[in-house]
Image (cartoon, rainbow, N blue to C red):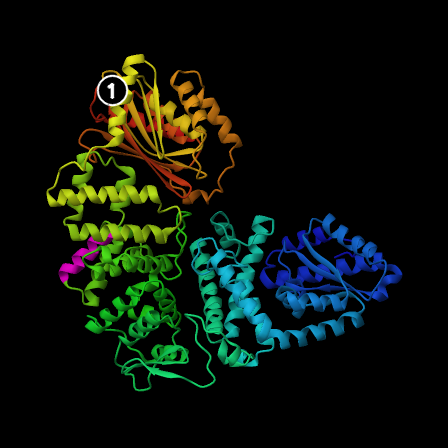
Amino acid sequence: MAGDTSLRDRRRNLLAEPGLRGEDFGQRYAAEADQWLSSLAERVAGDSRRHLALLAVGGYGRGYLCPYSDLDLVLVHAGHRDIKAVADAIWYPVWDEGVQLDHSVRRPAEMLAVAADDVRVALGLLDARLVWGEAKIVDPLLAKARVAWRDRLGTKYLPVLEVQMEERRAAAGDVAFLLEPDLKVSHGGLRDASVLRAISVFAPLLADYADLASVEEAASLLTTIRVELHRTAARAQDRLLLQDQDHVADALEYVDADALMAAVSEAGRQIAWVSDDVWRRRRLWDPTPPSRHRFRRGKPAAPSTAVSVSLGPDMVEIDGEIALVPSADVSNDASLAFRLAATAAELDRPIAKGSLHRLADRMPPPGDPWPPAVLAALLSLLAAGHPAIDKAESLDQHGLLVRLIPEWAAVRNKPQRNAYHTYTVDRHLLEAAALAAELSDRVERPDLLLIGALLHDIGKGFPGDHTKGGMEVVRRLATRMGVTPEDVHVLVDLVRHHLLLPDTATRRDLDDPTTINNVARAAGDRVTLHLLAALTEADSRATGPSAWGSWKAGLVAELVNRVDRELQGDHQSSGPDPLLEAHREMMEEVRRNGLPAVLLAPPNVVVAAPDRRGLFSSVAGALALHGMDVRAANVSGEDGVVVELFTVEVARGTWPDTARLREDLAAVLSDQMAIGDRLSVRARVYPARRRAAAHVLETDVGVDNEASDSATVIEVRAKDEVGLLHRLTRTLYEADLDLVSARVSTLGELVVDVFYVRESGGGKVTDGGRLEEVTTAIWASLRA
């Protein structure tokens, strides 16, 4: 490329080259940046050249740049007086190119002093190289930086690096299991690979011990994907969002986005596995004397001599790791893998690497059916709760989990293309099982709860509906595990109905006897009901932050309580309802003065008013105007007075100004506010939520005339928008339907609005043409 070509044009030309991907792109772009910066610095330095050096650090120092990465540069000088003018003459043209710049101006001694206290600077200097200027200025600096890194590695840098790794994981999660991972800073990402690379420079034992070649291979894959993500987003974006995954998959010639994300997961798992293993076994390679190590729970101690503690006939704890004894019958005992993992989980210790290799090389499949010891060992592992997740991952990394449960291969690394979920399917199942262990004291059969939680979504790895497919998989698998036929039936029912309670609680009227009867009939008995209740909580909490909250938990608890009483034959009321008494008082007030009445009792808003068409829609609009999300609503009335009870959540956690809300409700009820216009304005100025990929959000309208004996149930699935409930209920009003109750669920960026409606004459909507007319109107409202 021509020497006077701008850096922006050079980058644009490289991005346009077909087939220039990954590290090849990064090296070419870094070389172009070198040439452009050298030419620039040469022009502006003048006679100062012999006093200056331009140093690339970090990723750029390694001779690699993603399309929109920062240029990390240090202008090093030997006490030059006019350095600011030269520095500005370099930095400003870089900014003018629209390239992000991380820059500093230092003397060599200043660089070393900063690196002594800042491990990030020290890491950057390890990869630093001269881009332009006098080598004699930077060569001694880089040599001293490497010596300082070696001398401070064990005593100063390693503790800081370990804390930083843990903080990154807590803040950014895992590349392997997130549906939208940050390829750079999530655990198992490129930052972890860089740290391993830097440590190994002066820890030769680490290079011999750890599989660093596999880390480089995985990092190369993530780098290739990161380059394409930058190209797709046309900016410095390292989080692989759902909306970008299809484009990146197409560009890199993956079959689809699922295949891309499975590759990301596999690479992230490998980097994280090696990284975690390296830190757990730091005593094997750390140059720090053992006496300086501090013991922490879950991490092996580092005594000066080996310590061995027997843990029964087959296992031993050696230096804080759980290992198999040499005499363990690895070739014949298929329970050893689960037993070893269970013991390690219970003691919160890592599994010895040598024992995992022995099992991987020699352990047989468990057979059909499993010996009882294998199932008992699996239950012991699951009962350990969250520590079991890492131990299951250790088994999985060595192919043992799939050997024991072949069906696991179908969900391993499998993404869930839904912003409602946080994890891949396999990690979601392990998280759900760990959470189920915390709830095991709530159920009569904790063993079935643990197995049910582990397998409830196994059908997502197989074609067709995941519930139906999962039932067949679990029937076969549980039988092979040696579960009794009666318990197999319960496990199949847990899979069949694992969404029954949350769907019913959030989308059906709990005051409708048909709702309670349907759930009681599906559960069959109280034991299964309680298992479903615990599974619902574990599954929801393992799904993601938007899947479980106080509102949903309360609805599920109320549903379970009512169904439990139904199964016991107890149909008595649970006592007087204070809100019901308030309803009666408000209705009397409306009758006396003919004016609307409003009661604010967080999380409830109660409105009583003379009956008129469209009242519900107007009130719902006023609540949306104040940032209140309606979660449930019920309508009742008599003698020309209507009471509407709204259960709401507040978007930002703070109840809006009560006086202003009352004023706006009064204005709506007296037809003094054009609520539709106000909502349109709010929708334009209100910050929009980030959209997921279009195909992830399933828009649908369904009608069910069997869910209630007295009303037609209309279910609408659509993208969450300001004022959506107002629009939909106005459509129902304009269709001449009476709204009896409503339930609203938010699933990430998708909402499911369920309406119980009747004809104005009081009956269900049964005429086919009429139903088509209503659904067509709703679809039109959604497209508006």
The residue under label 1 is which amino acid type?
Ser
The x and y percentages for residue 500 are: 25, 46
Tell me if 548 is positioned left or right of 274 in this view: left
Tell me if 740 is positioned left or right of 219 in this view: left
Question: Can residue 143 be seen in the rendering of this structure?
Answer: yes
Question: Can residue 210 be seen in the rendering of this structure?
Answer: no
Q: Residue at x 37, y 84 (%)?
A: 308
Report the magenta stretch's main SS. Answer: helix
When asked about the image quadrant of residue 377, the answer is: bottom left
The crowd level at tag 1 (other Cα within 10 Å; few <14, some 14-19, many 20+) is some
497 w.r.t. 434: above or below: above
The x and y percentages for residue 492 are: 20, 55
Q: Is residue 101 magenta?
A: no
Tell me if 770 is positioned left or right of 293 in this view: left
Residue bounds of the magenta highlight:
485-495
Tell me if 135 is positioned left or right of 191 in this view: right
